[in-house]
Image (cartoon, rainbow, N blue to C red):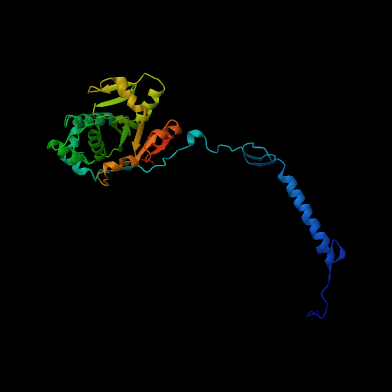
């Protein structure tokens, strides 16, 4: 075929200075090159390959073996900050300001010098509002409504109602407080800026538990009981009955992620879906309600609520 320069297209290829007919290149040389590349790649794939990237040593094992890949820790354990996977909600001071003003809570805690003094004074005040009785009909999770209905004799209140009122009183003063379900009982936890930790409060018995001078969380109490340690100090103003039986309640517990029942009310029948059970062993999930969440990681439940 003629080209614009008037010449005929060359039918040969020049390889390494040799002039070879094109049909020989495509029929022989190219297939041979492909075969060589494939063979080299196959051989490399079956051998151990070591790649060093700084401190990383990634090893691919011989075919047919199952040696683990070595992965280094980039961050020292004491520098790691684990964050909760759950969305905890709390009512704020503005929403609960009517409760704070009406019940004159600032006068209740007046003169308190520490977080713990505030907590104990509020717990004492809440416990004094009524004597334990059956909550029938069951009042909504709203401290003002609970107090009004009980004071009018329209219903009663036991451990849960004391906790609902105490938590909302604490929240009205700017504290992060939440509900915790233990075995057949309800208690509260509050974040103490002074101790930089969660502290359990049981308003039904005006009770908290410590190890030495440090008040404990539900999780810490749970761990100490299961480990068989007996250096817990129980501080209670009301009779708990058999103390061992009382402490056994902390063998199982669930933290509520929803603690904003004034700004976002729900029916009490829906509460279970907002509880996170802590399990020491994942197999224990067979013993909790099917609609409930669980975790085996305490840092998912015990965190600084002002930093998460």
Where is residue 71? Give x, y as percent.
59, 38
Q: Is residue 1 above or below residue 256?
A: below
Q: Is residue 40 above or below residue 220?
A: below
Q: In the displayed structure, does residue 51 sit left or right of residue 116?
A: right
The residue lying at 35 percent from left, 30 percent from top is 218
Q: Which residue is situated farthest in the left direction here?
A: 152
Quarter the N terminus occupies: bottom right
Where is residue 231? Give x, y as percent.
36, 19
Q: Is residue 36 above or below residue 59?
A: below
Q: Which residue is situated farthest in the top direction here?
A: 230
Where is residue 180? Give x, y as percent.
32, 34
Q: In the displayed structure, does residue 58 sit left or right of residue 216?
A: right
Q: In the displayed structure, does residue 160 sit left or right of residue 34?
A: left
In depth, the one of 276 and 118 nearer the eye is 276
Report if residue 287 is visible in the image.
Answer: yes
Report if residue 103 is visible in the image.
Answer: no
């Amino acid at each position: 075929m003629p080209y614009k320069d008037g010449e005929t297209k060359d039918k040969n290829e020049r390889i390494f200075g040799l002039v070879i007919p094109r049909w020989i290149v495509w029929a022989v040389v190219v297939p041979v090159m492909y075969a060589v590349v494939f063979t080299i790649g196959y051989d490399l794939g079956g051998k151990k390959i070591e790649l060093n990237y700084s401190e990383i040593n990634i090893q691919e094992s011989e075919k047919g073996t199952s040696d683990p890949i070595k992965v280094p820790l980039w961050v020292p354990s004491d520098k790691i900050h684990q964050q909760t996977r759950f969305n905890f909600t709390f009512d704020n001071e503005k929403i609960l300001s009517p409760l704070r003003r009406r019940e004159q809570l600032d006068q209740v805690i007046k003169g308190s010098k520490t977080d713990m003094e505030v907590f104990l004074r509020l717990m004492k005040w809440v416990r004094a509002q009524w004597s334990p009785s059956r909550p029938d009909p069951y009042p909504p999770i709203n401290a003002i409504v609970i107090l009004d209905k009980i004071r009018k004799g329209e219903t009663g209140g036991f451990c849960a109602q004391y906790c609902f009122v105490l938590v909302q009183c604490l929240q009205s003063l700017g504290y992060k407080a939440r509900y915790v379900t233990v075995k057949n009982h309800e208690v509260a936890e509050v974040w103490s800026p002074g101790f930089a930790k969660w502290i359990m409060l049981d308003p039904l018995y005006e009770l908290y538990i410590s190890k030495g001078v440090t008040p404990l969380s539900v999780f810490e109490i749970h761990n100490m009981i299961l480990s068989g340690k007996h250096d817990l100090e129980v501080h209670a103003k009301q009779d708990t009955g058999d103390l061992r039986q009382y402490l056994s309640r902390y063998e199982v517990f669930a933290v509520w992620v929803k603690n904003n029942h004034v700004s976002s009310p729900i029916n009490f029948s829906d509460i279970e879906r907002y509880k996170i059970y802590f399990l020491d062993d994942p197999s224990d999930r067979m013993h909790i309600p099917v609609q409930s969440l669980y975790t085996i990681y305490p840092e998912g439940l015990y965190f600084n609520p002002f930093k998460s």
